[in-house]
Amino acid sequence: MTHRLTTSEADLARAATLLRDGGLVAIPTETVYGLAVRADDADAVTRLFVAKGRPADNPLIVHVADVDAVHAVAREVTPLAHDLLARFAPGPLTVVLPARSDLPRAVTGGLDTVAVRIPDHPVAHALLRLAGVPLAAPSANRSTRPSPTRAEHVLTDLDGRIDAVVDAGPTRIGIESTVVDARGTVPVVLREGGVTREEIAAALGHPDTAEHDAARRDDALAAAARSPGTRHPHYAPALPLHLAPTGGGAELARSIAEGGGRVGLVAVRASGDLAPIDAPTDARPDAPPGAGDVVVLGVPRDPAALAADLYGLLREAEAQGLDAVVIESVPEEGVGRAVMDRLRRAAESSSA
Ligand code: TXA
Ligand code: MG
């Protein structure tokens, strides 16, 4: 049975006790909800992999309360990691470092490195303090489902399979942390996320890390091979997902709907005129007979708002039983890179 907990002092104490006892507790972070378990308990970590249906070789991110606590799981904190954490912790940045040998191998999927982050959420922080141990926490979804950005999403996937969920409302950022290999002297981005390449480059006084990676493509490929999660299937939508050009979502959705069925549309407000999106297809005089409908799922005002709503909108499209969903592309800069990364993976694994 899965307890629904609030953020009251009593409920947080209960969540911390469950965690200390080796339980699986979904907790809010600023990115997405994580399914937390004490990182020093190999049996508990194994139960977590089973609950999520996650491949055993896909390692977990370990969450700690502050920079000092990184040493509890990492053998070495490189000068680069120090600089990154000084600028971005707490926050949506995960650093990959050499792992301490006493960290259970189940956490690192057998690798000799560990991914660590310091979440920027008062509830996550309180639970780390109360539990008093590092918490391994992957996103709290069933494997291949979108990451949960609300407690209800967690329950949709994991009700009855985990001990509790702490409901702190919707998460702020909506996509996962940026994972950076910080073992060397230059950062290698293994997964795009809440901290942008531009911010990393500005903080370190390096040129744009994207250009840097392009110049070292071989390194980047080797790095991708080192980040096992990028090999595994990601969110595979239960319905075809079409990526439309910026500003071209309404047109693509209408043309798909002309073949029949109900087509969801997510269009970014800044990218075009809203009026045509709001007009229902069946009101158009030229709509062919038997044409389907376009259902406007959401009109986020900018790429950051799209990031915040993205996973919820995808779950909504599935819940409404739509036949397809069209999402407009956003420029590949700032948080737009992470959004496009997630959308491409989802579109590739959909049947569209
Ligand atoms: O925002 C987030 O990062 C959320 C919240 C809950 O913190 N967590 C999250 O965890 O997204 P998960 O397990 O869904 O994704 C972790 C990613 C995977 O791509 C995994 O392969 C990678 O981090 N990763 C973990 N340990 C690694 C390591 N030692 N080396 C390289 N990549 C690693
Ligand atoms: Mg995940």
Image (tube, grey):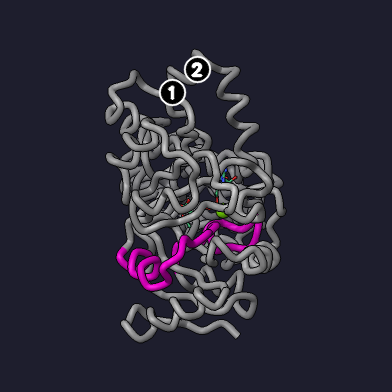
- Residue found 46% across the figure and 48% down from its top: 116
- Residue receiving disc 2: 214
Label 1 beta carbon less than 8 Å to ligand 1: no
Is 147 covered by the magenta stretch?
yes
Q: Nearer the viewer, residue 12 or 234?
A: 12
Q: Nearer the viewer, residue 157 or 8?
A: 8
Q: Which amino acid, by three-letter code, is at mark 1? A: Ala
Quadrant (top left, top right, bottom left, bottom right) of the N terminus: bottom right
Quadrant (top left, top right, bottom left, bottom right) of the C terminus: top right
Is 224 covered by the magenta stretch?
no
- In the picture, the disc for residue 30 is none
Q: Residue furthest top?
A: 215
Q: Which amino acid, by three-letter code, is at mark 2? A: Ala
Q: Nearer the viewer, residue 131 or 56?
A: 131
- Residue found 49% across the figure and 34% down from its top: 181
Q: Position of residue 50 (x, y in %)?
A: 70, 66
Asked whether residue 272 is in view, the answer is no
- Residue receiving disc 1: 210
Residue 176 appears left or right of 42: left
Q: Are marks 1 and 2 in contact (CB under 8 Å)?
A: yes
| Vertical side of 313 occupied by 70: above or below | above
Asked whether residue 197 is in view, the answer is yes
Identify the element where label 1 is drawn: helix
Label 2 beta carbon less than 8 Å to ligand 1: no
Q: Position of residue 314 (x, y in %)?
A: 53, 57
**Where does the magenta region start and end?**
122-150
Q: Position of residue 280 (x, y in %)?
A: 45, 56
- Residue found 33% across the figure and 26% down from its top: 201
**In terms of image quadrants, where is residue 63?**
bottom left
- Residue found 65% across the figure and 32% down from its top: 225
